[in-house]
Image (spheres, rainbow, N blue to C red):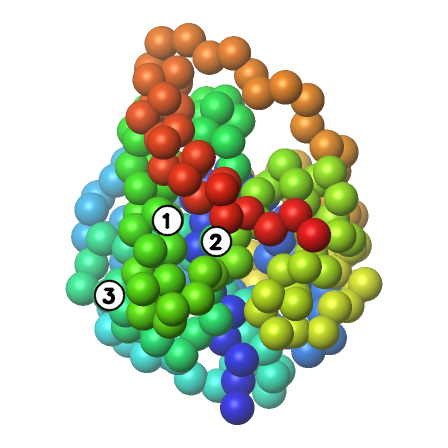
Amino acid sequence: MTIHIAMWSGPRNLSTAMMRSFASRADTFVSDEPFYGAYLKQTQDPQPMAEDVVASMDCDWQRVAKSLRGAAPNGRPIWYQKHMTHHIEGPVTIVDFPEMRHAFLIRDPRRVAASYANKRTEIRPDHLGTFRQREYFQSVAERTGRIPPVVDSDDILADPTKVLTALCEALDLTWDAAMLEWDKGPHPQDGIWQSHWYDAVNASTGFGRAPGPPPRLEGRYREVADACMADYEFLSQHAING
């Protein structure tokens, strides 16, 4: 049977690098934000390449959810699914995936807001996804009686081998050192939006350096980061760092 890994992230959270990492495993198929088209079609959120994204994807919530619960493409035993929590605005929620192994990828909202500012001009607290990450984390913990794994992007960059080994253990997967590197450039499973969003990861062949102090923000970006900080700090208490 397929092992389904649902990684719940926010944008600019090292989420594509993590997808690259899992795609480097010979036993794993990856999917890139499968509900993005459905989210854009329903909300009409004015994001870059929105019309192209909608046209490129299945935008039926239930049909996408059903496919994600099935066998992984290409016969792979593991299916890693990169999800943005803020995309889940339709009739599908985390409770529709009870058999999946859920994990949460977090990042200091100050870093997210600063990174987001480089790609779009408008940003709201819900775009960072931290509130729903906390909600989904609590839902999984209550349903299973176990704390689901949480990984912080800062910890991954500081020691990727240590943190990813701990993540694999928490997900009951065998550690694979291939997860530390990948080929440069776009990858076959990238969403069509990679041309706008993935310039940094496309130039990489592995995880980057550990970051310095969080950036100083002003105005709207500071307000957004501050609004998300309590949820981030709650989740960070549960972060595994090896």
Residue for point 45% across, 29% down: 109
Q: Is residue 10 above or below residue 120?
A: below
Give how far across and how far down residue 155 sits, in percent: 66, 41
**Closer to the camera: disc 3 or disc 2?**
2
- Whether 57 is drawn above or below 241: the answer is below
Of label 1 and label 2, which has the lower sequence position? 2
Q: Mark 2 = which residue?
A: 104
Q: Which mark is residue 92?
A: 3
Residue at 40%, 79% (x, y): give it: 99
CB contact under 8 Å: marks 1 and 2: yes
The amino acid type found where label 1 is placed reads Gln
Image check: 62 left or right of 230? Answer: left
Residue labelled with disc 1: 133
Q: Amino acid at mark 2?
A: Phe
Element under label 1?
helix
Which residue occupies the foreground of this view, 228 or 64? Answer: 228
Q: Is residue 115 above or below residue 187?
A: above
